[in-house]
Image (spheres, rainbow, N blue to C red):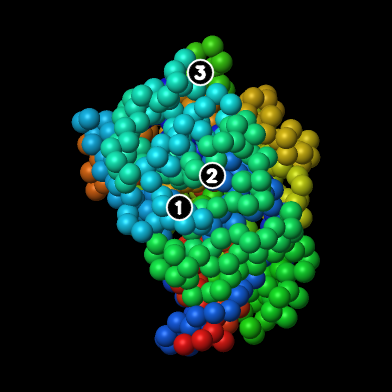
Amino acid sequence: MPLKKTGLLVTLILFILFGITACTDNRSSKGVDEQEITDNSNQAATKENTNKPKSGGTVTFAATKPFDSLLERGLFEHKEDELILNFISDSLVDKSDSLELKPGMADYVVDKNAKTVTFTIKDGIKWHDDTPLTSADIAFAYEVIAHPDYTGLRYANVSMIEGAQRYHEGKADGISGIDIVNDKTITLKLTDIAPNTMSILWSYPMPKHYYEDIPIKELAESNAVSKNPIGTGPFKVTNIVPGKTIELEKFNDYWRGEPYLDGITFKVIDDSQTTEALKNGKVDIMAIPDSKYKDVKALDNVILNEEISLEYSYIGFKLGHWDKEKEVNVMDNPKFQNKKLRQAMAYALDRQGILDSFYNGLGELIEAPIHPASWASADESELTVYNYDPEKARKLLDEAGYKDVDGDKWREDPEGKKFTINFDAASGYEISKPRTNYIIKNWQDVGLNVRLNGGLKELNLFYDVIEHDESTVELFYSKWDLTGDPDPTGLWRSDDYWNFSRWVNEESDQLIEEGLSDKAFDEGYRKEVYVEWQKILNEELPNIFLYAPADVYAVNKRLQSVHTNAFTSQVDTHLWWVTEGKE
C-alpha cells in the first residue's frame, strides 16, 4: 500500500492494538457547577512562576493503572509505559501545542523529489550510560523494527523505507534504503513520500551498544528493557517495583540542560485514592478521573489544567454497507439519505447538556472531525454550528416530510409509514446508560421514535455489529482517537473499511487525496484543502459530531513550570522545579 494512503490507518491500527479503541469512556455521571480552569499555558499558574527556578527536590507523578515495564519506545503497548518513557526518552521529531512537527534531537530535511529524509543529530546528546547518540542508533531502531523476529507493533512506521519489506520478509540481510553518512547524519530512501511522511516515520533511536547482543525476539523481556532501561531523556531509571513504582533521577548531562529536579517518582495509585493523595501531597501531578473532578477542584493546594483531548465523540448514521468483494463502501440504506433529517437530528441534540451532565462540563463542542487545536482546523465561522435548537429541528423535519399524521406523537416518514430508529451504544461504564437515555430523549422530544436496539451492548459485541453492518444497526454512539496529522485517510474515503457510516462522497475523496498531493507540501495550501473537506462533512453530516472531552491534570502548587497540551502533561520536564528548592 503506498505511503500516501497509510497515515491515519496506521495510527488507527495501533490504537486498537494498544487498547485505546473507540467507544471506551471512563467518565463520571456527575454534573458540574460553573468553574474557571487554567488553559494549556498552565505553567502551574502560581505567583512563584515569576521567580527564578530553583534546583533540587523531587516530585511524585501518579497514574491509576499499572505499567508493564516495556520501557522501550519500539515495544511499549499501553499508556502507562508511555508516561514513563516521556521522562526517559526523546524523539528525533517533536510536536508543538498546535500539533505541528518540529526538530527534536535532530534537524531533518525532506527531499520530495529524491524521496529521501535526512536526519542530522544535534550536538551533545548522550544515552544515560554516557555513550554518545549516533546515526547508527537510528539505523539500528529501523533494523530492529523491520526484523522478522520483531515482536512489537511499529513495523508500519518503517515499512516505507526502501528495502524494509525484503528485510522484514527475510529476503535481505539489511535495509537497502538506509545510508549512514557519518556519526551524526543518516539518509533514508523511501518508496514514497507525502506531506504526512514525517508524522508516520519512526523517530526514536535505540541504543545499539546496549541492545545488539540481545536476540531481537527476546528484547521485550530482557533486563535492558524491563529492569534497566536507558534513554536520552532528562531523567534516568534507578529502581523499579514492577507495576507499582519507578524511581527516576536527573540525568546531569541531558542535552537540553541539566534538569532542576533531583528526581521523580512514578507511582501507581487506585483512582479512589486520587483526592486524598493530592490533598496530603503524596502525589504532585496526575491526570484525574472525571469522577473525582469536583472533589479535587475543591482542594486549595492544587491547580487544575483542562486540555481538549485528542479524541472526539460522534453519532454515526449507518448509511450503507461494506462490499467485501469490491472492498468499497456502498451507500444503499435509504433511511437517512435525506440530509434535512440528519441535520434536524443534530439540532435536536443538546450536546452541551451532555457535556454538563456527564463530563463535568469539560470539553469542546465540535462541528467537524479535526481537532480544535490543530493547525488545519476550520474556523467556526466557516462551519454551520448545530446549537441545541429543538424548534429548528422540528421545522426541518416538517420540511423533509416527517410529520405525525396519526396523532400518536411519533412522526411518520414522508410516505406516511411508521418511522422508528434503532440506536446502539456500548455498556461498561457508569455513564453509559444515563447518557444513552439523555440522547434518546432529545430525539423523542422532537417526535422521532428512537429506541435502544436490544439494550446496551458489551463492548466487543458493539464493535462487531457496527463493523459488520448488522442489519438492525441504524444509528450508533462512538468515538475516535486522533493523531497530530489531520489526514483523514483510513476513516472517510469510499474505500476505507473504518468508514463505519459507509458514507460515499466523490468530492470528499478528491479532497482527501489532494491533501496528500505534492501541492500539499505547502502547509497553507494543505490547510485550505482540509478546511474545504470539513465544510463538506459539516454540511452533509454523515456523523453528528458531538464534542472533544477534556483531560484534566491536577498539579500541586509547589510544582512549577508544568506545561500541558492536547496530548501530554509532560512538556519540557527538565524545566520543572519546586518552590522549596535551592536558588
> Left or right: 50 with respect to 123?
right
Question: At label 1, which amino acid type do we have?
Answer: Thr
Disc ID at residue 169: 3
Sort mark 3 into few (<14), some (14-19) or many (20+) by Cα contacts within 10 Å: few
Upstream in the sequence, badge 3 or badge 1? Answer: 1
| In the foreground, 275 or 571 | 571
Upstream in the sequence, badge 2 or badge 1? Answer: 1
Inter-mark Cα distance, 2 to 1: 10 Å
Sort mark 1 into few (<14), some (14-19) or many (20+) by Cα contacts within 10 Å: few
Mark 2 lies on residue: 210
Q: Nearer the viewer, mark 2 or mark 3?
A: 2
Mark 1 lies on residue: 131
Q: Quadrant of residue 138?
A: top left
Question: At label 2, which amino acid type do we have?
Answer: Tyr
> Left or right: 434 with respect to 181?
right
Inter-mark Cα distance, 2 to 3: 25 Å
Residue 551: % across, % down: 58, 61
Callout 3: SS: loop
Extreme residue toward the top, this view? 325
| In the foreground, 260 or 461 | 260
Q: Residue at x 51, y 57 (%)?
A: 128
Residue 254: % across, % down: 44, 63
> Left or right: 257 with respect to 548?
left
| Mark 3–mark 1 CB contact (< 8 Å) | no
